[in-house]
Image: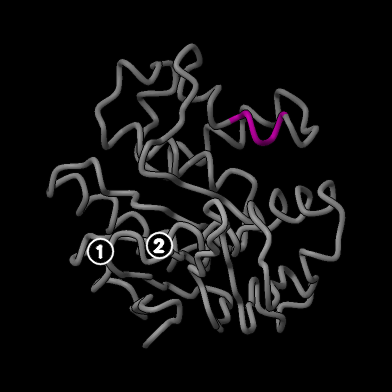
Amino acid sequence: MNSALPVISCKHLQKTYSEGAQAVQVLRDVNMEITSADRIAIVGSSGSGKTTLLNLLGGLDLPTGGSVHMAGKNIALVSETERGHLRNKYLGFVYQFHHLLSEFTALENVCMPLLIAGVGIQTAKERAENILLRVALGERLSHKPAELSGGERQRVAIARALVANPRCVLLDEPTGNLDRHTAKEIQQLMAELNETLSISFVVVTHDERLANSMDRKLLLKDGTLHE
């Protein structure tokens, strides 16, 4: 990929949902670029469309107007298979509810994206262990999610998002279920990974401390973004 290209960009992005006979426009005209090592917070009231925007940026949903480009490609003009390939290659996702698989260990959970991508099991384990060490979970490799604290589970989720070396990680309320101390740890971890690995982070959050720690804070209001 040409490093001069934004990881993700959107122009005049619109999203409208149908509720019965009524059309509800959630996003009206959203424009943004995410480049290497960006740290961006998206804030706004509940129901303002923050998660909708994140799903569009990540190619999990398609716009009803405007465009989203990932690695220079308009994601609405490629096949679902190609969209999946772009997501796997360039993006990582972290959600408020970590979505770890309860029957698997931390190491096995982090291996999953690599195994799905066809990486050999030994190589996947080595890469998963390395990233779990990076997020200070080296002594929790064989623990299952139920045996981990909330903060540890979220760090496993972050490790899983990072294991395939993405250019950008999209996070939806990553500290929403965490106490203040643990939320601060996640905030510090993101800052460290951004600095050392040059990964871009785009976080949707109601956590003002987390939002204020990012390089840019964008307000989503009335379907548009405001700096």
Residue that extends furthest to the bottom in the rendered view of this protein = 227
Amino acid type of the residue that numbered disc 1 sits on in the rendered structure: Leu
Q: Residues within 10 Å of mark 1 (few under 14, many from 20)?
A: many
What residue is drawn where x is 53% and y is 45%?
161
Residue 35: where, in percent of width, then height? 58, 78
Residue 188: where, in percent of width, then height? 27, 58
Residue that extends furthest to the top in the rendered view of this protein = 103
Residue 78: where, in percent of width, then height? 86, 60
Residue that extends furthest to the front in the rendered view of this protein = 21
Q: In the rendered structure, does residue 112 fall within the stretch colored magenta? A: yes
Q: Quadrant of residue 31?
A: bottom right
- 121 displayed left or right of 156: right
**Cα distance in 3D space between marks 1 and 2:** 9 Å
| Residue 172 numbered mark, or none | none
Label 1 secondary element: helix
Residue 29 higher or lower than 129, as above or below: below
| Residue 203 numbered mark, or none | 2
The reply to whether callout 1 and callout 2 are in contact (CB within 8 Å) is yes
Residue 165: where, in percent of width, then height? 63, 52
Sequence-wise, which precedes: disc 1 or disc 2?
Answer: 2
What residue is drawn where x is 51% and y is 72%?
27
- 102 displayed left or right of 153: right
Amino acid type of the residue that numbered disc 2 sits on in the rendered structure: Val
What residue is drawn where x is 39% and y is 43%?
135
Residue beneath label 1, please?
Answer: 210
What span is in magenta?
111-115
Q: In the rendered structure, does residue 163 fall within the stretch colored magenta? A: no
